[in-house]
């Protein structure tokens, strides 16, 4: 059975990954910063989805997060929308910008782009803070 600890775990991991991404950004490891910031967004949306699900249905949503949603930020956003959550314009914009993220970035060589990394970290911060406030 899924308990509030699932919500807390995903929420805590989201904040931790965002902090790590910010450290990587400061150290000019731009591709790695984007990679971890994507996980921050993923985990924050998963925490939000679990919190929006009635307690009795949480085991099903937790399983679905692994099987159906995976790492797909577009699907996670759609899951939040399906719960009738009003996504503010700034959050929707941040999610749209970040929607191309994939864990496949781990296979991309090179340092990455500093401008894109700064924009991505800013977008991740918007999403994580918004989702955290809704939980």
Image (cartoon, helix red, strand yellow):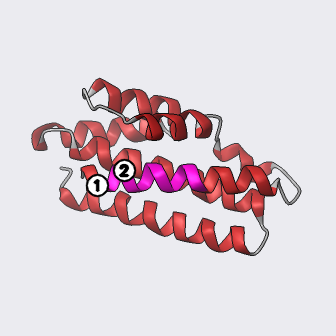
Kindly identify the residue that appears in the image at 34 percent across and 27 percent down: 81
Against 113, residue 8 (above or below) is below
Residue occupying the far front of the picture: 89
Against 20, residue 11 (above or below) is above
Residue 112 placement (x, y as % from top left): 83, 55
Q: Secondary structure at mark 2?
A: helix
Residue 54 placement (x, y as % from top left): 13, 39
Q: Secondary structure at mark 1?
A: helix
Q: In the image, which residues are magenta?
A: 122-132
Per the rendering, the mark at residue 42 is none
Judged left or right of residue 81, residue 39 is right
Kindly identify the residue that appears in the image at 76 percent across and 57 percent down: 31
Check disc 1: other Cα within 10 Å, few if <14, some if 14-19, many if 20+. few
Does any portion of residue 94 appear in the rendered image?
A: yes
Against 78, residue 132 (above or below) is below
Kindly identify the residue that appears in the image at 41 percent across and 26 percent down: 78
Does any portion of residue 68 appear in the rendered image?
A: no
Residue 20 placement (x, y as % from top left): 58, 71
Residue 40 placement (x, y as % from top left): 50, 56
Judged left or right of residue 130, residue 22 is right
Give the camera-side residue of 2 and 115.
115
Judged left or right of residue 25, residue 81 is left
Per the rendering, the mark at residue 130 is 2
Q: Please give the residue where the numbered disc 1 appears in the rendered image.
A: 133
Residue occupying the far right of the picture: 110
Distance between the alpha carbons at the discs numbered 2 and 1: 5 Å
Does 123 lie within the magenta span?
yes
The reply to whether discs 2 and 1 touch (Cβ–Cβ < 8 Å) is: yes
Examine the image and state in which quarter residue 85 appears: top left
Give the camera-side residue of 88 and 30.
88
């Amino acid at each position: 059975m899924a308990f509030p600890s699932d919500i807390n775990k995903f929420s805590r991991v989201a904040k931790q990954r965002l902090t790590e991404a910010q450290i990587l950004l400061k150290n000019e490891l731009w591709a790695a910063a984007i990679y971890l910031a994507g996980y921050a967004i993923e985990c924050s949306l998963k925490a939000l989805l679990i919190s929006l699900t009635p307690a009795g249905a949480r085991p099903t949503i937790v399983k679905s997060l692994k099987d159906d949603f995976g790492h797909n930020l577009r699907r996670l956003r759609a899951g939040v929308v399906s719960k009738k959550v009003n996504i503010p314009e700034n959050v929707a914009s941040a999610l749209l910008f970040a929607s191309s993220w994939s864990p496949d970035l781990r296979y991309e060589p090179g340092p990455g782009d500093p401008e894109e990394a700064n924009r991505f970290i800013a977008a991740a911060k918007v999403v994580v803070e918004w989702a955290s406030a809704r939980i």
